[in-house]
Amino acid sequence: HVAAARAYRALAEGTGPVAAKAIMRDAVAGETERALAGLDAAHAALHTERGELALAVRAAAGIGAEPIADVRDSDALGIAELADALGIRTSTLRHWDAAGLVVPERAKGARRYTPEQVRDARIVHQLRRAGYGITTLRTVLTQFRRSGPGELR
């Protein structure tokens, strides 16, 4: 039992508790093929997550390094325009606003996103896709705004 508990804990650390439970259940039941298939699936999922994270980090770094110069009032985007550009719902942008991630300017009550805020929204969008939570993103964006794009990684 001790060996099984240790194996589960080690497995859960790498695959998560749900996958580890299923793999261990199959292994203990003598379902070796199913246990190995579960382990393969867990490894494949980790591989996919690593790839998605690497893409998100590269995308966020590229977005953060884009120069924002010669900004005009006409360069600002409305909430619907930005949502369309990012491929997300306007409610998502409102949620990010309420959470303090990307807080737009207000013009006669309407949200208007400056180029800097559009850049921040693009970074948030990429990192959310990679699984980052709101609390972590607040920290990342605060550091980014303070330090600049070189520190995004």
Image (cartoon, rainbow, N blue to C red):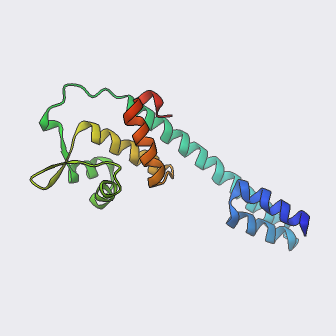
In the rendering, at what x and y percent does residue 91 appear?
29, 61
In the rendering, at what x and y percent does residue 36 appear?
80, 60
In the rendering, at what x and y percent does residue 80 appear?
21, 54
Foreground residue, 49 or 137? 137
Quadrant in the rendering for residue 140? top left
Q: Is residue 78 above or below residue 35?
A: above
Foreground residue, 51 or 148? 148
Does residue 97 appear left or right of residue 19 in this picture?
Answer: left
Foreground residue, 96 or 78? 96
Residue at the spot x=84%, y=67% of the render?
27
Does residue 30 appear left or right of residue 41 in this picture?
Answer: right
Residue at the spot x=65%, y=51% of the render?
46
Foreground residue, 58 or 100? 100
Q: Is residue 72 above or below residue 13?
A: above
| Total numbered labels placed on residues in the image | 0
Does residue 113 appear left or right of residue 3 in this picture?
Answer: left
Quadrant in the rendering for residue 145? top left
Does residue 72 appear left or right of residue 100 in this picture?
Answer: left
Q: Quadrant of the N terminus?
A: bottom right
Residue at the spot x=41%, y=36% of the render?
144
